[in-house]
Amino acid sequence: MKKLIELCSLDHREHLSISYDDSLHFGANQHWFEKDIQINGGCGPICAYNAINYIEKTQDIKPILHKQVNENLDYVYGLIHPMEILKVIPTKLRKNKSIPLTLGVPNLRRFSNKFIRGFKNDPIKFGITKYVLNRKGRDIHKVIDFIKNELENEHPVCFLNTFTKSTLFIDPIVDLKTSLNINAVQYEEELMSFRKYTFMTHWVLITGVYQTEDTDSYYVECSSWGQICYFRLNDFIEKQKCLSRIYPSGMLSIRIVSN
């Protein structure tokens, strides 16, 4: 069996846990939004919410998310403001559920600009570092170095997959305290038995990174849909398609600049 070796993780992943509807979740969930358009395109705001929530709980700053969970989610949704296209669709066509209601937050630039602009009048100033995955010359080791450096400095990393088809492995363990122990998932074969989800056009928050023993295969631990998930990072080097080169996947690390 191929053992997974943890290379790095956020020091206090337990602070991402949220109690909601009498259950404990690993980060927030898009389904907690009230409107369908928010649920469909809310992964960017959820990722931002999780990053802010982690920073707020681990650093000495004035609370930002000081209301009830749903009010805080609506606040961050308005801050990031995904691209809603419902208003430009003719009334008759809106009844067709196959027509998307939103484009979400489709690129790193929009996320970064909206996030920074949202706090321009706030005493807390954030800094964001961008890392585009699909640029020429990127290799897996450079990507790993970026993630490790940011996580070691306690900077949450938001990850956007545009059009690289990958698999999200969803951890079935209900007990978050057990799941968050170092090396809770010990072997690559364990991931293969998890529930699987096709991973595209989606934002997640990176919380840790693993290497498969004796190989150059890397897995990322992340928060998505309020659960602990994993995906194979090598896919974003090996499976680049035409669309993913035009609309590149990438990462944003978030840090406090001043407060």
Image (cartoon, helix red, strand yellow):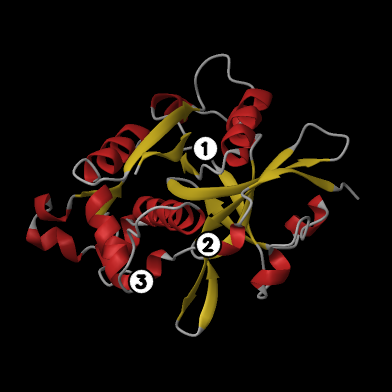
Q: Position of residue 126 (x, y in %)?
A: 35, 39
Q: Nearer the viewer, mark 1 or mark 2?
A: 2
How many numbered badges does the structure rendering display?
3
Image point 33% across, 59% down: which residue? 40
Pointer 3 with pointer 2, Cβ within 8 A: no
Disc 1 residue type (three-letter): Thr
Q: How many C-alpha atoms fall within 10 Å of the one at disc 2: few (<14), some, or many (≥20)?
A: many
Q: Position of residue 52 (x, y in %)?
A: 40, 53
Whole-number angstrom distance, CA of label 3 to CA of label 1: 32 Å
Q: How many C-alpha atoms fall within 10 Å of the one at disc 3: few (<14), some, or many (≥20)?
A: some
Q: Position of residue 70 (x, y in %)?
A: 31, 71
Whole-number angstrom distance, CA of label 1 to CA of label 2: 27 Å
Pointer 3 with pointer 1, Cβ within 8 A: no
Give the SS element for disc 2: helix
Disc 2 residue type (three-letter): Leu
The disc label shown at residue 69, or none: 3
Q: Which residue is mark 2?
A: 16
Image point 66% across, 27% down: which residue? 140
